[in-house]
Image (cartoon, rainbow, N blue to C red):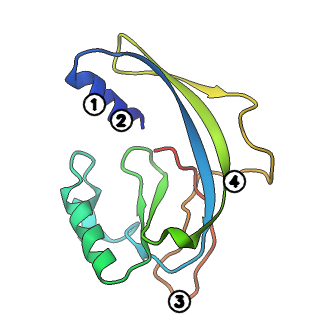
Amino acid sequence: MIFHKTVKYAEVNRFDDSVTDQAFLADFNAPSHDLRDATDFADCLAPQSYIASQALAAQLLEAGALGVIYPSVRRAPGTNLACFRPALVGNVRRGDAWRLRWAGRPEPEVEKLRGVKAPGRPLQPPLALGTVIRQQPRKTKCDAID
């Protein structure tokens, strides 16, 4: 979110805003295409362009894929999951909340808000929601902020 908001503010040359971002956690348990170690898809992980990654996602969706798991290009060593079938996402719950403040500079102040997290089981470190391309899926969790 920080990256995209900063690009937007740079376009109008005004870095003056305060927003709150709520992360959500969810469970996903289905086979997914895994790009984390796939060197053939480096162009899909280009932080400056979504052209190749959107084309790959369209191909995977057309082929009936359930999702794709990939390394975060903005928050190493984070992992992201794009789920193509919303019905496969379950147990959605609130994660941490953050206040982001731009005060004249492209780098925002980031404040973790206290007491905003919904009750429930303890949160795990940010991993991916999803599974890898193996016959035996693994169940993991994800911090949705990127």
Relative horizontal placement of residue 17, taking residue 127 as reference (left or right): left
The numbered mark at residue 135 is: 3
Q: Does residue 120 lie above or below 109 as drawn?
A: below
Mark 1 lies on residue: 7
Q: Earlier in the sequence, mark 4 or mark 3?
A: 4
Mark 1 to mark 3: distance in Å? Answer: 40 Å
State left or right for residue 94 relative to residue 122.
Answer: left
Q: Amino acid at mark 2?
A: Phe
Give x and y (percent) for residue 32.
Answer: 46, 76
Instruction: Evaluate if marks 1 and 3 touch, with contact meaning CB atoms under 8 Å apart.
Output: no
Residue type beneath disc 4:
Gln
Looking at the rendered structure, the secondary structure element under dot 3 is loop
Q: Residue at x 63, y 28 (%)?
A: 112
Image quadrant containing the C terminus: top left
Label 3: few (<14), some or many (≥20) within 10 Å? Answer: few
Task: List x then y, in percent, for residue 53.
Answer: 26, 61
**C-alpha distance separating marks 3 and 2:** 35 Å
Quarter location, residue 1: top left
Q: Earlier in the sequence, mark 1 or mark 4?
A: 1
Toward which corner of the image does residue 37 lie, by quadrant? bottom left
Q: Earlier in the sequence, mark 1 or mark 3?
A: 1
Instruction: Identify the element where label 4 is drawn.
Output: loop
Q: Which numbered marker is on residue 131?
A: none
Label 4: few (<14), some (14–19) or many (≥20) C-alpha neighbours in 10 Å: few
* Residue ID at (41%, 66%): 36
Q: Tell me residue 67's x, y (percent).
A: 43, 72
